[in-house]
Amino acid sequence: LVTLILVVQALAHIAKRFFSTKNALILSSIASGFVSSTATIAQLGIQVRKGEMDAKSNAGAALMSCISTLVLLFIVVGGVSWDWLKILLLPSLVAMLILAACAFILLHKAEPAKNQESPESSDSKMFSLKEAVIIAAALTLIQAGVYGLEILLGNAGLLAGTLFASLFEIHAAMASVVIQGDPSNTRLIYALLLGLGAHALAKSVNAALTGGFKFALYFAPIQILHMAVLIGILWWMVF
């Protein structure tokens, strides 16, 4: 998992070097989304609240970071279970298209921040081993916590652990679900759907708290829409 995260960081860094400055907002959001989409949304919201960036353009960038969330979900789930990856693939791709289309509409007239640094002048590292190890360790601890709650409390523990973990980052919460069985297990499907829905709502609340009403108004409806579509298609495929 550490190696995969390092590869993703490196590819995102290289991509930023090959694109023009006007695309830096999109690319930096995608790259940082691979580290933490939740943190990226909070940072973009703070910029809006401070008046440094437009709410519409930063909401579009925040939605782009959510695409990274789904891609990283593929990496994490795919590394655990091919069966789960197969049923998540189509719903997630449709959700990505919704995010990308809406994000590009919002970003169409995006203006760079006053003090934004161009990608070419940035001397940031290609990847961070420290960040990769921290992320992998956090994912492992969350998985262990959810598994432990299930052992102690049964189905209620599984649902409670998945819900709690999903409020922060979705990858470990979903990995902790899929390692416990195949998609034919109905209780695991319910846990997965609950986690996805809770994560979308948590990100929307995050946007409102950090960026204010206008930022959340652009971000939250699309965030909830794409996740509702993902859950709906997944439900249709499984049940």
Image (spheres, rainbow, N blue to C red):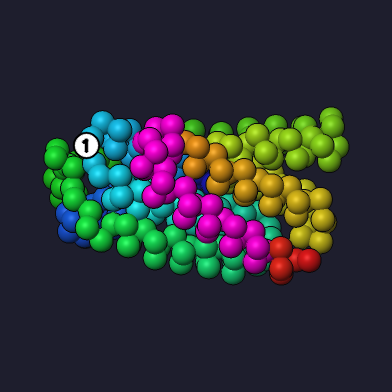
Disc 1 residue crowd, few under 14, some 14–19, many 20+, Cα 10 Å: some
Residue drawn where x is 18% and y is 48% of the image:
112
Compared across the picture, whether 168 is left or right of 108 comes to right
Residue 231 within the segment the image draws in magenta: yes
Q: Where is residue 14 drawn, in percent x and y? A: 28, 55
Element at label 1: loop
The quarter of the image holding the C terminus is bottom right
Q: Where is residue 238 drawn, in percent x and y? A: 75, 66
Tell me, yes or no, if residue 159 can be seen here.
yes
Tell me, yes or no, if residue 129 can be seen here.
no
Q: Is residue 20 above or below residue 47?
A: below
User: Which is the main secondary structure of the residues drawn in magenta?
Assistant: helix
Q: Looking at this view, is 33 or 213 the one in front? A: 213
Q: Where is residue 72 drawn, in percent x and y? A: 51, 52
Compared across the picture, whether 52 is left or right of 155 comes to left
Residue drawn where x is 69% and y is 60% of the image:
84
For mark 1, what is the residue?
A: 52
Residue drawn where x is 22% and y is 58% of the image:
109
Identified by mark 1, the residue type is: Glu
Q: Is residue 59 above or below residue 78?
A: above
Compared across the picture, whether 188 is left or right of 71 comes to right
Residue drawn where x is 71% and y is 35% of the image:
161
Q: Looking at this view, is 231 or 92 the one in front? A: 231
Q: Looking at this view, is 19 or 51 the one in front? A: 51
Q: Where is residue 159 drawn, in percent x and y? A: 75, 40
Q: Looking at this view, is 102 or 94 the one in front? A: 102
Q: How many marks?
A: 1
Compared across the picture, whether 221 is left or right of 113 comes to right
Q: Which residues are magenta?
A: 207-234
Residue 213 within the segment the image draws in magenta: yes
